[in-house]
Image (tube, rainbow, N blue to C red):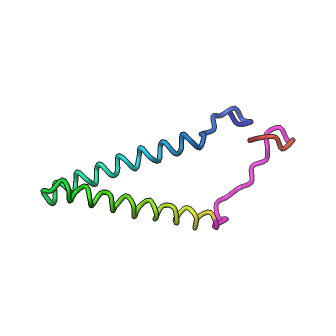
């Protein structure tokens, strides 16, 4: 819990959520590719390439946004002593 009493998401939870989301997306792309091409192998190939491109694209997108200061606010610790997370 953070100083305000609300739950804080752990990194491992975020990672598992991201992985399960990507698996679902890969499955969906595979299914669409299979339906369009009629080939499960081709559909799987399309979905794996799609996932790799999106994985690297997301990484570089996040790194670029890490450099942008717009929309960030400094939040003071609730107890005023700098404890926090």
Q: Residue at x 35, y 46 (%)?
A: 24
Residue depicted at 60% across the width and 40% down the height: 10
Relative side of 71 to 41, left or right: right
| 74 relative to 53 in the view: left or right | right
Q: Main secondary structure of the magenta part?
A: loop
> Residue extending furthest left?
38
* Image x and y of residue 42, in percent: 20, 59
Q: Who is closer to the viewer here, 37 or 72? A: 37
Task: Give the left or right position of residue 9, taking residue 25 as reference.
Answer: right
Q: Quadrant of residue 12?
A: top right
Quadrant where the N terminus sits is top right
Which quadrant is home to the C terminus? top right
- Height in image: 81 above or below 58? above
Q: Position of residue 53 (x, y in %)?
A: 39, 64
Q: What residue span does the magenta drawing correspond to?
A: 67-80
Measured as percent of width and height from the top left, residue 76 is found at: 79, 47
Q: In the image, is residue 75 part of the stretch drawn in magenta?
A: yes
64 and 78: which is toward the camera: 64
């Amino acid at each position: 819990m953070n100083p305000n009493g609300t739950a804080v998401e752990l990194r491992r939870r975020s990672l598992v959520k991201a992985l399960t989301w990507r698996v679902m997306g890969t499955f969906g792309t595979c299914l669409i590719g299979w339906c369009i091409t009629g080939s499960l192998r081709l559909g799987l190939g399309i979905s794996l390439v799609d996932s790799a491109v999106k994985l690297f694209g997301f990484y570089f997108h996040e790194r670029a946004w890490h450099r942008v200061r717009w929309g960030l606010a400094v939040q003071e610790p609730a107890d005023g002593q700098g404890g926090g997370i």
